[in-house]
Amino acid sequence: MIWPPDGGEFPGSTEPGRIRFAVDSLVFPHVPLTSSPPADRLVVGLETWFGTSGAGLLRAHADAEGCYAIAEARPIAIEIDFGDGGRARCALPLDSDPSGRPACARHTYYDHRLAPGGRFTVNASYVYDVYVSTNENPAFRYVETVVSTPTPLDVTARELQAVLR
């Protein structure tokens, strides 16, 4: 295969080209978001806790003409859109307060009527700081911050009902 397809200069022949190719080769995972209570049983007025695991160091390489670039994406935060106008940006790893509650990744739904049937879509994205190393400059250096594509989690919030007898 001839690359690039337009017959232009191969971007790997320069350090900036190798850096861009390595950064663009990073594959960002979906956010495995969980909730407590479970996503289909949230209660209006009761705090919902969100958790995640799986954000790890990502690496990609670009090699050309005996030269290289390595891109490392280091997870620094998670951004959560709770679906009802609320948002949070929480540092990773997620911390808990002394009582065991998430220090950041928590939300209270106050009105289930904001969405049909109390159904909201929560969207979560990882935030990464990207660093690169090249044979010309082997010390890793910061180049940019990247926010991954949002991962949706459908949740349902209901009002609590009790039957007294």
Image (cartoon, rainbow, N blue to C red):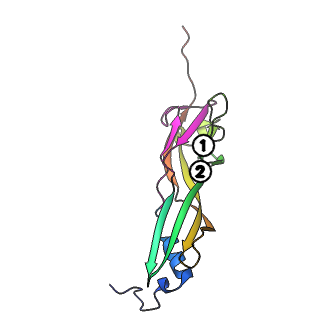
Relative horizontal placement of residue 97, taking residue 128 as reference (left or right): right
| Residue 33 part of the magenta-drawn span | yes
Residue 26: in sight, yes or no? Answer: no
Relative horizontal placement of residue 6, taking residue 141 as reference (left or right): left
Q: For the magenta stretch, what is the residue range? A: 28-56
Residue 117 or 64: which is nearer the viewer? 64
Residue 104: in sight, yes or no? Answer: yes
Say few, some or many: other residues with alpha carbon within 10 Å of mark 2 (under 14 / 14 to 19 / 20 or more): many
Q: Which residue is mark 2?
A: 78
- Report x, y in % for residue 39: 49, 37
Image point (50%, 45%), residue name = 53
Snapshot quadrant of residue 163: top right
Q: What element does badge 1 sit on?
A: loop
Outermost residue on the top side: it is 165
Image point (60%, 43%), residue name = 94
Q: Quick one: quadrant of the N terminus? A: bottom left
Above-or-below relation of 74 to 164: below
Question: Which numbered mark, 2 or 1, is in the foreground of this view?
Answer: 1
Image point (42%, 86%), residue name = 4
Q: Quick one: quadrant of the C terminus? A: top right
| Residue 54 part of the magenta-drawn span | yes
- Report x, y in % for residue 25: 46, 70
- Report x, y in % for residue 110: 65, 35
Q: Which residue is mark 1?
A: 94
- Label 2 to label 1, Cα distance in Å? 9 Å
Image point (56%, 22%), residue name = 161
Q: What element does badge 2 sit on?
A: strand
Reading the chain from its start, which is encountered first: label 2 or label 1?
A: 2
